[in-house]
């Protein structure tokens, strides 16, 4: 008699090369976009995600490496999403369109609504009942979502625990976390000497111009650190001048970069290995992999800016930190001359020349002048 093979009763995530989060993502049947970068998040292919009332896709980019989740959702003109309560914080950046987010306590009390537009950034606090509405009757609204669900699912692999979670002990869902317009505040322990922009709603990441000099990274660039109430998720935005480029640096995985405005490219590479070139424009998205050097270049006559969404700040102390500036950052005086050559060649194709001062390549202590 032939032996029948018994199906294992062990959950799929046990002894699987795929993480619980990857298995869950695959189970949705939604498109998963892989690779080093997304040229334009505004145009990537989506598919209906009926239970959430949107079209959606996941981004599984090199560099996310089991830390962060990124997905894109799109609401059709005039559409509303059904209410959800997640057990994790989620940052949302508006790639296209306009709409309203309604947040409340899990039981629907303490309801707050705010209107967003293209280039807004906001936080959905964990446990908050949240719903989105597209306020345009003609155009879709497209959102980029960022969270650290892969980390949470590594510890507890049950998707429903994270995706339907109404726990609230009254401390997380304060008035400030349900709605607080962003305000500049003094820097904290994590960003000494730099001011922070704190709140859960940031109206226009493309227009914000109150940034502090970010002296260590060169190019005369400036930055602002972003804090959300009661959330370990954080962000920063960097702006750097026309026809310039920043110093290469490296750190841990999971930090997702999206471009609100500008045109240029970034280079990413593991020490001693081949370089990956990433052309970018508004809507481009990429994630520097763990300990890969990365460097950003502006190819236009206007300032460029990028928004970086970070994993929980604990990883800024451990995995994400630039621990040894001498090893984890490359000064212009030390960089591969091919970097400068490539930048100048790309500028020349646009009939532009570099604004990088010659002294920056000769003097490691060269200081940019800030207004
Ligand atoms: Fe970085």
Image (cartoon, rainbow, N blue to C red):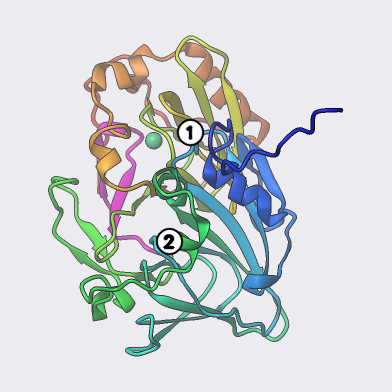
Q: Position of residue 72 (x, y in %)?
A: 61, 58
Label number found at residue 233: none
238 or 156, nearer to the observer: 156
Name the residue at the right extreme. Answer: 1
Question: Measured along the vertical axis of the image, is residue 77 above or below residue 210?
Answer: below
Question: Measured along the vertical axis of the image, is residue 218 above or below residue 73?
Answer: above
Q: Does the magenta stretch include residue 270?
A: no
- The residue to which callout 2 is attached is 90
Q: Position of residue 348 (x, y in %)?
A: 62, 29
Instruction: Name which residue lies at 51% across and 49% down.
Output: 69
Q: Position of residue 101 (x, y in %)?
A: 48, 79
- The residue to which callout 1 is attached is 288
Instruction: Name which residue lies at 71% across and 56% down.
Output: 43
Question: Measured along the vertical axis of the image, is residue 188 above or below residue 349?
Answer: below
Give the number of the mark in front: 1 or 2. Answer: 2
Indicate the quadrant where residue 325 lies. Answer: top left
304 or 36, nearer to the observer: 36
Ranked by sequence position, the earlier of labels 1 and 2 is 2
Give the total number of marks visible in the rendering.
2
Helix, strand or loop under label 2: strand
How busy is the neighbourhood of tag 1: few (under 14 within 10 Å), some, or many (20 plus)? Answer: many
Q: Is mark 2 within 8 Å of ligand 1?
A: no
Which residues are the magenta region?
206-227
Indicate the quadrant where residue 277 lies. Answer: top right
């Amino acid at each position: 008699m032939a032996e029948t093979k018994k199906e294992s009763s062990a959950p799929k995530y046990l002894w699987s090369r795929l993480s619980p989060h990857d298995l869950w993502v695959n189970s949705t049947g939604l498109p998963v976009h892989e690779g080093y970068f997304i040229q334009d998040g505004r145009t990537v292919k989506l598919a209906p995600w009926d239970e959430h009332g949107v079209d959606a896709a996941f981004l599984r980019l090199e560099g996310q490496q089991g830390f962060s989740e990124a997905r894109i959702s799109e609401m059709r003109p005039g559409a509303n999403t059904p209410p959800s309560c997640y057990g994790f914080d989620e940052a949302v950046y508006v790639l296209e369109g306009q709409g309203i987010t309604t947040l409340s306590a899990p039981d629907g009390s303490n309801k707050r609504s705010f209107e967003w537009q293209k280039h807004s950034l906001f936080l959905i606090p964990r446990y908050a009942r949240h719903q989105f509405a597209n306020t345009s009757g003609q155009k879709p609204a497209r959102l980029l979502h960022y969270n650290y669900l892969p980390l949470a699912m590594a510890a507890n692999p049950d998707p429903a625990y994270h995706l339907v979670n109404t726990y609230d002990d009254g401390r997380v869902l304060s008035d400030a976390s349900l709605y607080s317009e962003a305000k500049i505040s003094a820097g904290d322990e994590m960003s000494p000497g730099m001011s922070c922009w704190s709140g859960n709603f940031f109206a226009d990441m493309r227009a914000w111009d109150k940034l502090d000099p970010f002296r260590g990274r060169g190019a005369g660039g400036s930055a602002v650190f972003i804090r959300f109430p009661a959330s370990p998720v954080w962000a920063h935005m960097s702006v750097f001048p026309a026809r310039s480029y920043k110093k290469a640096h490296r750190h841990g995985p999971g930090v997702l970069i999206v471009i609100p405005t500008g045109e240029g490219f970034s280079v990413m590479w593991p020490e001693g290995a081949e370089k990956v070139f990433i052309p970018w424009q508004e809507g481009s998205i990429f994630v520097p992999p763990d300990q890969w050097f990365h460097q950003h270049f502006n190819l236009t006559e206007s300032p460029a800016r990028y928004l970086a969404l970070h994993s929980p700040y604990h990883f800024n102390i451990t995995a994400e930190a630039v621990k040894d500036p001498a090893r984890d950052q490359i000064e212009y005086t030390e960089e591969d001359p091919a970097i400068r050559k490539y930048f100048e060649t790309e500028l020349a194709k646009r009939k532009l020349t570099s604004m990088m001062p010659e002294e920056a390549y000769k003097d490691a202590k060269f200081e940019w002048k800030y207004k």
